[in-house]
Amino acid sequence: MSDIDAAQYNTLTFDCYGTLIDWESGILGYLQPLLEGYDVHVIDEFVLETYGELEPIAQAEGGSYKQVLARVLQRFGTRLAFTPSDADLTGFSHSIENWRPFPDTIPALTELGERFELAILSNIDDDLLAYSTKQLQVTFAHTITAEQVGVYKPDAKMFEEAERRVKGPVLHVAQSRFHDILPATALGLDTVWINRPSAGAAKLVDANPTWTFESLEAFVDALG
């Protein structure tokens, strides 16, 4: 018997980074070589936990995600006593082009796309998201970004815009409890928490998802 009644939902909305794209590996792949170039040597967990602390602060200040990432890197520099160059600052957002999907992402999306409309709800700029959707190899009915809405998750306006645009009922699927599960649940959406191993790039909060799975593969299996 299926754990989830798939017939209840028309659209699956996905967070992208951390859920579909391995953003922690992407963050580390850019920041660790950069830090070492400035003779700064810190463990991966420190980098990701610091990122998870600094990103919401930078997002609260507004602007594009490119600007958010630049401010995050500037604050890394302040904390670790180095001054990133302009090329370092712009390079952080450009590195998203090289961030890769998790191994289970494309098989899961391919199967799910045959049964549901798929949408992405992401704290990103449109052009940066385009780098990632090319890699995901499926067609998304909607891509809803912070650039379009003018706010960043966990702001409820992101989820309200998704409900306005997509064909309901909606099931929201995400790895970050802070950015996604907590605010989506507060709005009454059913949610799936993909509890991927994480070293802290997303702020940790308590939340109560409707369902929890360790992977997208396990989520697909639960849909029967």
Image (cartoon, helix red, strand yellow):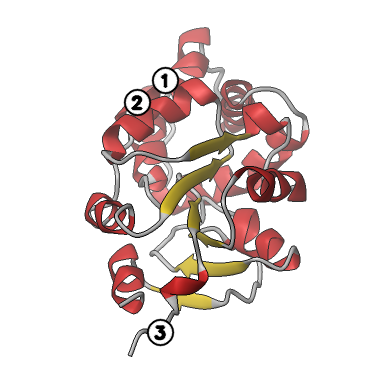
- Mark 2 burial class by Cα count in 10 Å: few <14, some 14-19, many 20+: some
Q: Along the line of sight, which residue is nearer the eye, 141 or 203?
A: 141
Q: Secondary structure at mark 1?
A: helix
Give the percent coordinates (x, y) of residue 125: 55, 26
Amino acid type, residue under disc 1 in the picture: His
Q: Along the line of sight, which residue is nearer the eye, 161 or 47?
A: 161
Q: What residue is shown at x 38% (from left), y 64% (from top)?
A: 197
Indicate the quadrant where residue 204 lies: bottom right
Q: Is residue 203 visible?
A: no
Report the side of 64 relative to 142 (left or right). right
Q: In the rendered image, which residue does mark 1 sit on?
A: 94
From the viewer's perspective, is residue 164 above or below residue 208?
above
Amino acid type, residue under disc 2 in the picture: Glu
Q: Nearer the viewer, mark 3 or mark 2?
A: 3
Amino acid type, residue under disc 3 in the picture: Asp
> Of all residues shown, which one is farthest toward the bottom?
1
Q: Is residue 102 visible?
A: yes
Looking at the image, is mark 1 or mark 3 earlier in the sequence?
A: 3
Q: Which mark is residue 131?
A: none
Give the percent coordinates (x, y) of residue 222: 34, 78
Looking at the image, is mark 3 or mark 2 earlier in the sequence?
A: 3
Q: Along the line of sight, which residue is nearer the eye, 62 or 1?
A: 1
From mark 1 to mark 3, how far is it between C-alphas?
40 Å
Give the percent coordinates (x, y) of residue 62: 75, 28
Q: Which mark is residue 3?
A: 3
From mark 1 to mark 2, how far is it between C-alphas?
6 Å
Q: In the rendered image, which residue does mark 2 sit on?
A: 97
Quadrant where the image shows the C terminus: bottom left
Q: Secondary structure at mark 2?
A: helix
Q: What residue is shown at x 30% (from left), y 40% (from top)?
A: 136
Marks 2 and 1: in contact by CB < 8 Å?
yes
